[in-house]
Image: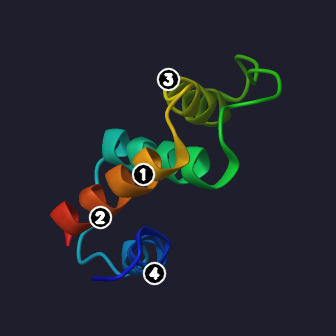
Amino acid sequence: MATLKAQFKTAVTNSKKLSARPDNATLLKIYSLYKQATEGDCSGKRPGLLDPVGRAKWDAWDKLKGTGTDEAMQDYVDLIESLG
């Protein structure tokens, strides 16, 4: 069985090859799980009202605060596999 890091790397590659574009909520989940898995807890200031996309991304990532790297990687892998 492949290691979690190898599965994650494969899932990242596969995320760029999805047959259909996921809805915005799913895209935010993909983004936030990727950021949590690769950078850890959300940091920096929350974007202002004039940046609604940045704000939505920051909020989605911030909701995962405290989630471990391995858990975020596994959730990301599972999500991409369910979309593929």
Asked if the residues shown at circle 2 and circle 3 are in contact, with their CB atoms under 8 angstroms apart, the answer is no
- Mark 2 or mark 3, earlier in chain: 3
> Circle 1 sits on which residue?
30
Toward the top, the furthest residue is 49
User: Image quadrant for the N terminus?
Assistant: bottom left
2 relative to 4, above or below: below
> Disc 1 versus disc 2: distance between alpha carbons?
8 Å
Q: Residue at x 70, y 29 (%)?
A: 51
Above or below, comparing residue 71 to residue 64 in the picture: below
Inspect the image, locate mark 4, and give the three-letter code of the amino acid beneath it: Thr
| x and y, in percent, of residue 62 in the image | 58, 25
Residue 63 is marked as 3
Neighbor class of circle 2 (other Cα within 10 Å; few <14, some 14-19, many 20+) is: many
- Identify the residue under disc 4: 13
Q: CA distance from mark 4 to mark 3?
A: 24 Å
Give the amino acid type for the residue marked by disc 1 in the picture: Ile
Mark drawn on residue 80:
2
Marks 1 and 2 close (CB-CB < 8 Å): yes
Instruction: Report, in whole angstroms, how far the alpha carbon at label 4 lies from the one at label 2.
Output: 10 Å
Identify the image quadrant of the C terminus.
bottom left
Q: Amino acid at mark 2?
A: Ile
Dot 1 or dot 2: first in sequence order is: 1
Q: Examine the image and state in which quarter residue 82 appears.
A: bottom left
Dot 3: within a 10 Å radius of its alpha carbon, few (fewer than 14), some, or many (20 or more) residues? few
SS of the residue under disc 1: helix
Q: CA distance from mark 1 to mark 4?
A: 13 Å
Dot 4 or dot 2: first in sequence order is 4
- Above-or-below relation of 43 to 11: above
Quick one: SS at disc 4?
A: helix
